[in-house]
Structures are given as C-alpha cells and as structure tokens.
Image (cartoon, rainbow, N blue to C red):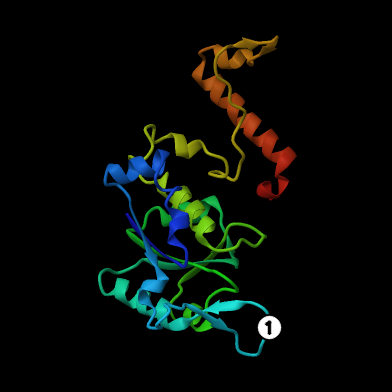
Amino acid sequence: MRIDILSAVPSLLESPFSHSIMRRAQEKGILEIHSHDIRDYSNHKQKSIDDYQFGGGAGMVLMIEPIVAAIEKLQSERQYDEIIYLTPDGTQLKQSICNQLSLKNNLLLICGHYKGIDQRIREHFITMEISIGDYVLSGGELAAAVLVDAIGRLIPQVLNDETSALFDSFQDNLLAPPVYTRPAEFRGWKVPDILLSGHTQKIEEWRDEQSFLRTQARRPDLLK
C-alpha cells in the first residue's frame, strides 16, 4: 500500500512514521508513506498557500491552486482509490472504515490547516472526509497520523502476529477484554484462574463474556 499526504507542515508527520510498527512496515516494503509540502506547489513568490476568506471573518483558508496542483501532479503518477480530507466535520473514524481502507492500494490524504481548505476542492476532488473525533486540532497532520497508523497495522505481515488485530477493540463492535501478564500474583492481586488453566475454549468463552460486559458497562451504544 502507498499513502501520500499533502500538508502545510509536513515535518509534523516525521516522528509518527519513524518508529515502531510504522517504521518496520516501511522497512519491509509493505507500506509506503510519502509526505508532500503544499508550499512546493505554490506559484506565489513567497510560497503562500493561504488567503483571507471571502465574506470576511477570522482565520485564513488554504488556497485552491496549490492543493489542486499537488493533487493533479500525484494523480498523473498513479490512480488513487480514495482522496481523503481530514476535517472535524467529516465522518467519524471507526474500525470498520479502517478495515475497508486497509484493503486499498493507493490513498491520498489532505490535511486541513487554519480554517480549512477551499470548499471547491472538497466538491470536486475529495472522495471521503474523515474526523477522528468531535474536537478541533491546529491541523490535520495528527489526524492523518492516527488514520495511517490505524490502517497500516491491519495490512498483512505488518504485525508479527497477524491475528492480534482481529481481537482489537471495535472489531466486532465490542471492547477488548482485560489482559494480564507475568507475574501471576503481585501485591496479592491475582490473575483470574481461568487464564492460567490452559483450557483454550474456556479462556475464549471468558474473554467473549468479559468483552460483552465491558462494552455493556462502558460503551452500551456499540451494542445497539
């Protein structure tokens, strides 16, 4: 899979993709992540990429010309399955969306900044709009990093144990069950006996029950 990201501040994306699982996925050649500076596509002498919004009001808007130039340049090199805009008013990100996107070959992400991007870009180029939550960030870079991480870990061979992602929270609209590791007892706090029993079927039944109970208590909306 290849993911391209258009950003006004691409340096914000360096650290999230330079460590841990995302770094290993790139080293294995399973995932390609390329960040592009929108300013590289500006025709302005000062490399400006924002301007005042028509109708007045506080806040600047990312201009249409450099973003469209960047999109069309990248589209001339490959076909994108989705062109995604990270924005607070997009569809809220869920595990099911990540599952679907992990099956794609090429994705193009556009990070909002300031008051966002010119609406005409959204109308003519964007195929999907995603929000990572009901709050506002300074820009879409952190949201893009979250999306890439959530998608990337689902790609086959990225995780050492590929079955691990299948049991994450939200995969079946349930939260993950409690987990424990050694020692089996610490300060008198003991690991549930069932997990030490070696009885695989009963352990799975216990985990299923715990997932349901945790979801019922913390996120009953997922059970509707």
Q: Nearer the viewer, residue 32 or 137?
A: 137
Q: Residue at x 58, y 84 (%)?
A: 52
Q: Residue at x 43, y 61 (%)?
A: 10
**Residue 167 screen position, x and y as percent:** 51, 36
Vertical order, 52 against 208 (above or below): below
Q: Nearer the viewer, residue 101 or 223?
A: 101
Instruction: Count the numbered circles shown.
Output: 1
Residue 116 lies left or right of residue 213; in this view the side is left
**Residue 55 screen position, x and y as percent:** 65, 90
Vertical order, 56 against 136 (above or below): below
Amino acid type at image mark 1: Gly
Q: Residue furthest right?
A: 217
Q: Residue furthest bottom?
A: 55
Residue 22 lies left or right of residue 77; in this view the side is right
Q: Nearer the viewer, residue 76 or 8?
A: 8
- Circle 1 crowding by C-alpha within 10 Å: few under 14, some 14–19, many from 20: few
Q: Nearer the viewer, residue 138 or 102?
A: 138
**Residue 57 screen position, x and y as percent:** 68, 83
Vertical order, 202 against 46 (above or below): above
**Residue 216 screen position, x and y as percent:** 72, 40
Vertical order, 3 against 210 (above or below): below
Q: Residue at x 30, y 75 (%)?
A: 73
Please state, as top left, top right, bottom left or bottom right, where the N terminus lies in the image: bottom left
Q: Secondary structure at mark 1?
A: loop
* Residue indicated by mark 1: 57
Q: Residue furthest front?
A: 46
Q: Residue at x 52, y 21 (%)?
A: 201
